[in-house]
Image: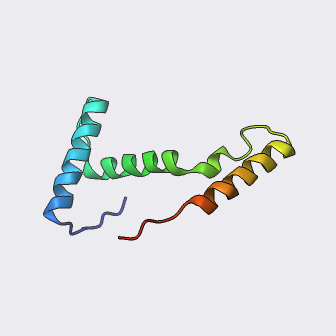
Amino acid sequence: MESKVLKVSKENYIWLLELASDIQKEKGRPVSFDEALSELKNRKMKKNNLLSLAGSWEMEDNEWDSIHKNLKREWKKWKIKSA
């Protein structure tokens, strides 16, 4: 494995230490920064990848039409509050 050197702020370094510490407690063994970052990446991918759900449920066309219609209606109501 090829290694690279990264410069991070003290704040990010402390955050990474805390992340590694939390993962170490979960796993019950020492965890490197590299492993902590990989774990964070994997958790984020699992949490935010809605496309992974595609095709995992069945619905009728009319159900989708209803969902789509309701979403469009609600998005029209949504406004960003200006500061």
Instruction: Indicate whether 20 appears above or below 26.
Output: below
Residue at the (37%, 58%) spot, across then down: 1
**Numbered circles on residues, count:** 0
Among the 4 quarters of the image, the one containing residue 23 = top left
Q: Position of residue 68 (x, y in %)?
A: 74, 53
Q: Give the image location of residue 79, x and y in percent.
A: 52, 64
Which residue lies at the image location 63% right of the left edge and 62% below the top edge?
76
The residue lying toward the viewer, choosing from 18 and 50, is 50
- Camera-nearest residue between 68 and 81: 81
Judging from the image, the colouring scheme is rainbow
Tell me the residue at 60%/49% (across/down): 50
Rendered view: 63 above or below 3:
above
Residue 11 percent coordinates (x, y):
16, 60
Name which quarter of the figure residue 63 lies in.
top right
Whether residue 78 sits left or right of residue 14 in the image: it is right
Indicate left or right for 78 with 38 as reference.
Answer: right
**Where 27 falls versus 79 (above or below)?**
above
